Image: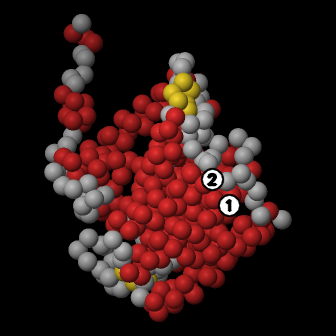
Amino acid sequence: MFYLNLAICFFAAILLTPLVKKLAFIIGATDKPNQRKVHSRIMPRLGGLAVFLSFIIGILILKPVGEYHLPIVIGSIIIICTGILDDVKEISPKLKLAGQVAAAAVIVIYGGLKVEFINLPFGGTINFGFLSIPLTMIWIIGITNAINLIDGLDGLAGGVSSIALFTIAGMSVVMANGYVTVMALIVAVSTVGFLFYNFHPAKIFMGDTGALFLGYMISVLSLLGYKNVTFISLVIPVIILGVPISDTFFAIIRRVVNKQPISAPDKSHLHHCLLRAGFTHRQTVLLIYAMAAVFGLSAFIFSQSTVWGSLIVILVLLVSIEIIVEKIGLVREDYKPLLKLMKGLKPINLRNR
């Protein structure tokens, strides 16, 4: 019966998306091509509304019960309204941020979801005290924007978000957290249903309506079950969201290095760099899907490892990320410190020793 209900969410997204597409044209929620965008025609961009409506149908049918359920739903409504306003009116960044802060405040201040302390791997505890509220809100707002930033190609944000959500659901099964499992699966299958219209060549974009909603839900669900635990456990959601977090982190580094405002838009995100490297639109999206899947698998391995094993996983991931960043020029073309170091290391000739 549970899987039947998930199927209802999946098909609801498939049936609702064409209706949302018509609505987008009626209310003017369209995306016009420009020099920063890869599409060449006017596209409807309200698709995230179909995902949200499917999500609402899912929670009405499955009725998941959790301590933070009401605040999560209220926050999701606030974030959806913010996204719809931006898709229709293109509101200012300050107003968009205000909507994100309001949504985060509902779950953190009203709902009480916050990371209060972490236990360090080699002993000791860090108590965040009064910083627990702002730090948790920064996490929610940061991940929300990270998903929004990777929404640059057909099906990219939706696919990466789905992989993250399925990973969160799988981890929650292992941790016996039924609420997070159900909520993550509802959002995931709704998103996959929408991808039938959003994968290249897209018929509709998810817009900020979808990207903000998915970012918000992922940020909140990834915290549930990982708060007030060990440092190692707290790293798990960071690994799961490795693709959007890495892209956002290096976008900030790139702008600092190039002496640009941090909020300045550019065409040097991960997907832009892969396109310039010669990959097609579809190949780029599938390649980033593969990266997201590797991060998800790494999160599972990380969670089952010893402390030293976990540190090795982190080291391998960090080195791999740095090599990819330097190879594709994610910071800038001449930024290749690790590759230059590796090239400068001469192999040892054992026969001469």
Image-quadrant location for residue 182? bottom right
Residue 329 point in image, percent of width and height: 24, 50
Residue 258 point in image, percent of width and height: 16, 51
Is residue 342 visible in the rendered image? The answer is yes
Furthest residue toward bottom: 26
Q: Are marks 2 and 1 in contact (CB under 8 Å)?
A: yes
Image-quadrant location for residue 95? bottom left
What's the residue type where badge 2 is placed? Gly
The residue that disc 1 covers is 70
**Vertical placement of 25 versus 188: above or below?**
below
Residue at position x 56%, y 26% from top? 119
Q: CA distance from mark 2 to mark 1?
A: 8 Å
Residue at position x 59%, y 24% from top? 306
The mark found on residue 111 in the picture is: 2
Task: Tell me if 179 is positioned left or right of 111 in this view.
Answer: right
User: Is label 1 in a helix, a strand or a loop?
Assistant: helix
Residue at position x 21%, y 9% from top? 352
Residue 169 point in image, percent of width and height: 65, 51
* Residue sitting nearer the eye, 226 or 31: 226
Neighbour tally class for label 1: few under 14, some 14-19, many 20 plus, Cα within 10 Å = some
What's the residue type where badge 1 is placed? Leu
